[in-house]
């Protein structure tokens, strides 16, 4: 032994369709050493492509004395949106793994190609390091077939990979475990409904640390009302728009993904703006809020039935962590389900995990900030140590 400490730093990369986010963490104490984002990829005034974006991120780290050539860097972790049924756990990246992720592009055409590019550039920059793919869909791979299958022709479903995959899995896994810790109980002893409410939104039912149902499906479009996405909609609406409205597939896609949700209902997708307009008596903003909350309550009731016993309902992500109004409205008058929100606790803004239910509430209501980058770093470091 030469006395040199083993490397403990992990770089987490999230290569999106138009941006690259990064965080550098020291897993010795899970501290953040640096974070940043390179935006407007392929746009005027931005960088030309993902390779240039990764190079810029590497340069920014180098300027802070935290270059990718550092011997203290142990591994690089990559967020990958869709793992299909093939990837159900963090996976060491090889050429064969990249090929498999490439084959899954039809299931996530906006996300997986960008993820693949990020992987390729990072492997070029540090070919000697273990690199790990952490999949958004992996946590939901445990849901039973009865929840995963759509009631369509089985051969067609098999041929095209049509089933419920779920997304935001890294967040749901992190938050459900953190909620158990907040309650002072082991994850295996706790049943949790997680409401991840950001611009994208999803719910999950987690029994004893294992996901048994989730609101998103084949794509991140199904489920809750979101910032610009519709969530659940009668499939017949799509046929009607094509047959009667004359919309083609791309137009329907843009409608449901870009022009729906809160934005489609009232022209704003920021819950803070919607709250301001509601206070001024704006009826369309009020309706958007009511539709959003109604969908939350439907899933809350459904997942209560799925779990049978619920120990905690937890809110996370931008809206979930910051909107006391959404939390209060979503859980109002649910005393028969054992859910009682403390209005004073709920109104308090705080940075860390907290309980906002009343002492009399049989079901704990919690607000737990999500930390997907830390979750990816933990998975990456653990897998790297085994190499």
Image: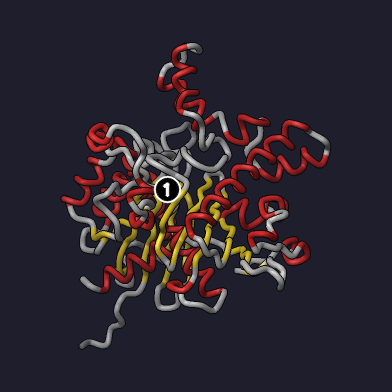
- Residue 285 is left or right of residue 5, and the answer is right
View extreme (left): residue: 96
- Describe the element under mark 1 as helix, strand or loop: strand
Question: In this figure, which residue is indicated by the disc labeled 1?
Answer: 20
In the rendered image, the quadrant that contains the N terminus is: bottom left
Q: Residue at x 64, y 31 (%)?
A: 265
Above or below, comparing residue 33 to residue 118 in the picture: below
**Tally of numbered discs:** 1
Q: Residue at x 56, y 44 (%)?
A: 199
View extreme (right): residue: 280
Q: Residue at x 69, y 40 (%)?
A: 290
Front-lying residue, 374 or 127: 374
Q: Residue at x 29, y 32 (%)?
A: 153
x and y, in percent, of residue 379 in the image: 35, 66
x and y, in percent, of residue 261 in the image: 58, 35
Q: How is the image coloured?
A: secondary structure
Front-lying residue, 4 or 206: 206
Above or below, comparing residue 199 to residue 320 in the picture: above
- Residue 231 is left or right of residue 328, and the answer is left
- Residue 286 is left or right of residue 309, and the answer is right
x and y, in percent, of residue 309 in the image: 52, 64
Label 1, residues with CA under 10 Å away: few <14, some 14-19, many ≥20: many
In the rendered image, the quadrant that contains the C terminus is: bottom left
x and y, in percent, of residue 50 in the image: 36, 42
């Amino acid at each position: 032994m030469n006395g040199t400490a083993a490397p403990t730093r992990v770089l987490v990369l999230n290569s999106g369709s138009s941006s690259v986010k990064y965080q550098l963490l020291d897993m010795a104490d899970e501290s953040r050493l640096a974070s940043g984002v390179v935006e407007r990829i392929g746009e005027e005034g931005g960088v030309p492509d993902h390779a240039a974006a990764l190079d810029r991120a590497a340069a920014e780290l180098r300027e802070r004395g935290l270059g990718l050539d550092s011997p203290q860097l142990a591994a690089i972790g990559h967020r990958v949106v869709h793992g299909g049924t093939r990837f159900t756990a963090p996976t060491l990246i090889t050429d064969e793994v990249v090929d498999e992720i490439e084959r899954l592009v039809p299931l996530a055409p906006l996300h997986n190609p960008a993820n693949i590019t990020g992987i390729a550039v990072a492997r070029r920059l540090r070919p000697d390091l273990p690199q790990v793919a952490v999949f958004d869909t992996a946590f939901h791979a445990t849901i039973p077939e009865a929840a995963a299958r759509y009631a369509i022709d089985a051969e067609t479903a098999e041929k095209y990979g049509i089933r419920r995959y779920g997304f935001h899995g890294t967040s749901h896994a992190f938050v459900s475990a953190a909620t158990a810790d907040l309650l002072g109980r082991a994850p295996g002893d706790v049943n949790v409904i997680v409401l991840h409410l950001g611009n994208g939104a999803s719910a999950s039912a987690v029994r004893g640390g294992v996901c048994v149902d989730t609101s998103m499906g084949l794509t991140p479009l199904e489920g809750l009302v979101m910032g610009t996405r519709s969530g659940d909609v009668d499939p017949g609406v799509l046929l009607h728009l094509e047959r009667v409205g004359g919309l083609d597939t791309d137009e329907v896609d843009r409608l449901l993904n870009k022009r729906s949700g809160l934005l489609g209902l009232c022209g704003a997708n920021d819950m803070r703006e919607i709250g301001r307009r509601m206070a001024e008596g704006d009826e369309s903003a009020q309706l958007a809020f009511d539709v959003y909350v109604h969908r939350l309550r439907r899933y809350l009731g459904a997942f209560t039935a799925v779990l049978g016993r619920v120990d905690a309902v937890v809110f996370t992500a931008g809206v979930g962590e910051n909107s006391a109004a959404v939390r209060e409205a979503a859980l109002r008058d649910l005393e028969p389900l054992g859910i009682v929100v403390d209005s004073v606790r709920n109104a308090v803004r705080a940075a860390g995990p907290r309980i906002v239910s009343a002492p009399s509430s049989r079901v704990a209501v919690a607000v737990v900030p999500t930390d997907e980058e830390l979750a990816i770093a933990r998975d990456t470091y653990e897998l790297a140590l085994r190499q």
